[in-house]
Amino acid sequence: MTPTSLAAFYAACAPTPETAAGVLPPPDMAQGVGHFNVFPLADLREAPPMPFTRRAYYKIVLCRNRSQVEYADRDPHSAPNTLFLVTPRVPYQWLPLTETPEGYCCLFDDAFLLPARTGVSVAELPIFQPEAYPVWEATEAECEAVEAIFHKMARELTSDYAFKHDLLRTYVWELIHLVQKLQPAPTRLATHSAAERIAAQFADLLDRQFPRQSPQPPLRLRTAADYATQLAVHVNHLNRALKEVTDCTTTALLGQRLLQEAKLLLRQTNWSISEIADSLGFADVAHFCTFFKRHAAQTPGDFRSTVVFEI
């Protein structure tokens, strides 16, 4: 359950000096400026299929020929000219469907963008939220616009410009905003009202409960009352605020997130159903199975067997 690290990525499939001289990260990129790299997909080494799991870094990929992307608990997306973004919050798997994939990839970590004085964290953008689905088929014009930024990144990465790190950050933000514009996502409301502030605090608190790294200890916050206590508000006040901002009750939002996490655990771990039930804070496996079947229209065991068949 530990997210795949950058070191693991480079060990498994990153370009090598023999196949792509100059595209490996320069040594100075690790000296207090975070990590960034960009390279053509054709330069990736042949490797076993990537596991369906979370990554400990961000990635933006444009694949020109056919590939399959499985993202969170969504159905696989299979098409040419696929553009997708990866966040440490959500597991995914990418499978090229041709011998030599064409396109570009850039990857970076939080530390690389931290020095940017934009007032906005990349994790706060709508396109990087857990509920977003940043996978889609791009038009030819959109592909060309994205490739133009990748080309600028690749040239700058190997330059000797003294401020190239700052320029690369600018290119990353340009690419992020371009792909976000290509797939419009609802922006979060400015948190001016009390209800909006509470809703934002609730969302942040909920996000911090995941991902689950092990079956034990169980989920710390499990009910609407737990979240209300943590936020120092009455549970009825929390419900009213969330209903006003999201049109959903606290219980409904918790149920949606628990179902999403349950599907991910059934799909990407070998934990028993009982261990998953414990990890997510259910009183026993029977309660978990009842919850899952009510919301997913199938038992956890049936869901897991279907997923194994698909993979």
Image (cartoon, rainbow, N blue to C red):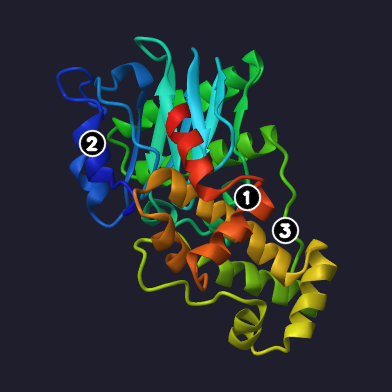
Percent of width and height locating residue 261 = 52, 55
**Residue lying farthest to the top in this orientation:** 99
Observer-nearest residue: 52 or 44?
52
Who is closer to the viewer here, 36 or 116? 36
Q: Is residue 57 left or right of residue 7?
A: right
Q: Amino acid at mark 1?
A: Glu
Amino acid at circle 2: Tyr
Q: Which mark is residue 131?
A: 1
Outermost front residue: 286
Using the numbered discs, state the Cα–Cα distance from disc 1 to disc 2 in whole angstroms. Answer: 28 Å
Q: Of helix, strand and loop, which one carries label 1?
A: loop
Residue 309's place in the image compared with 173, above or below, is above
**Distance in Å between CA atoms under marks 1 and 3:** 13 Å
Residue 10: which numbered mark, if any? 2
Contact between marks 1 and 3 (CB within 8 A): the answer is no
Residue marked by disc 3: 188
Of the numbered discs 1 and 3, the one sitting upstream in the chain is: 1
Give the amino acid type for the residue marked by disc 3 in the picture: Arg
Callout 2 environment at 10 Å: few (<14), some (14 to 19), or many (20+)?
some
